[in-house]
Amino acid sequence: MHSAPAIGELVQYPSIVPHNNQMSAERIVPEPLEESDQEISDALVLLYKLPDASLESIWQAQAALGVDFVEAALHTGLVTQSEIDAAQDWVRRRQMNEGRSIIEEALRRNPKPNAVVVWEGDKLHPGKELILAHDPYCERSEAIRTLRTELLMRTNGRRGAAMFALLSPCPGEGRSQLAAELALAFAQLGSRTLLVDADMRRPRLHTLFGADNAVGLAQALVDLKSMKVHGVEGVTKMGLLTAGSLPNNPLELLSGGRFERMAVEWRRSYDYVVIDTPPASQYSDALAVASVAGHVLMLGRTNSTPFNALTELRRKLATTQAWVLGAVMNNY
């Protein structure tokens, strides 16, 4: 293992093993890719922006013919051999670590042409704790970008914005900071990104950006017209929705239809939505958010989070409709 990284590797949950009742994570190392069908299909989707209708046609042909994605795409005539050759070249370059990943490069080249999101009020300044905004080349910043790439790969082919809920069992495990830095990382790709503080128990995101927290998610859930999204200085595509003044009934607000309808609007307006949540072992709010978000990133702190706490969180998540993308061990 390399020495004490700021953020642990993204791992599939079954690879997290107990060690003296603590957490240790063994990274899943994929076998070397040799222009795999999955990698080439990812490149085709991202480089040539295949619309949903085309993807559906290719998947139907793939199932009917029993062939891989590339052969099905050629069969339907929706991609050309030259486009496949170009995609293969991208895969080879990625395997050789030349430049940014396929996904990140494609996102920079082809931002979604949706309506511009207008921020309200003065733009915020990321606090000094958000290292990615101030020292982009340090070890932690590199780890954040690596995590961003893995999340992009695991959510490729989605419809609408990729929405991630960050969940961890206990307080003090770094959810808010990781959520903020992941949102910054997505926005730095030129993608419209919304950071949401759904921790209406002890919110922290507003303090990380020096934002006023009088009006936020809680007020928007009561009155949709009161939603106030803050812009972030130096990150033109990022917005922050704080938790707002603390309500008496956060779980009821997050479990109601208004939060679901709000999430639908976010999927239409943004490329990425990152949601912070309260400790899952103390409040059920996090599970309500996970059910709506659809994608969950679990978080624990090295030498702190008990293995059984994360196991219990995984069991609870199995009762929701959320897809657990993996777990991160925070060493920072």
Image: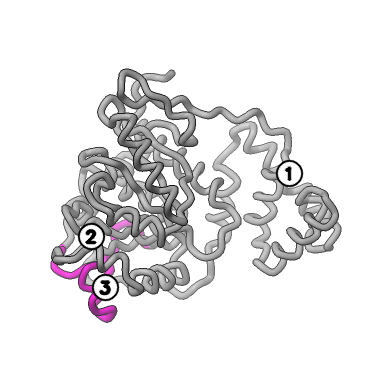
Between marks 2 and 3, how big is the CA–CA gap? 23 Å
Residue nearest the viewer, comparing 42 with 158? 158
Going by the image, does 55 lie left or right of 123?
Answer: right
Mark 2 or mark 3, which is nearer to you? 3
The quadrant the C terminus occupies is top left
Q: Position of residue 255 (x, y in %)?
A: 31, 66
Between marks 1 and 3, how big is the CA–CA gap? 43 Å
Residue for point 35% across, 20% down: 19
Residue for point 64% across, 28% down: 31
* Residue type of the residue flagged with mark 3: Leu
Residue nearest the viewer, comparing 287 with 270? 287
Which residue is label 3 attached to?
Answer: 221
> Upstream in the sequence, badge 1 or badge 2?
1
Point out which mark residue 228 bears: none
Which residue is label 2 attached to?
Answer: 124
Q: Secondary structure at mark 3?
A: helix
Part of the protein shown in magenta: 212-236
Question: Could you classify mark 1 by the number of other residues whose Cα lies within 10 Å: few (under 14), some (14-19), or many (20 or more)?
Answer: some
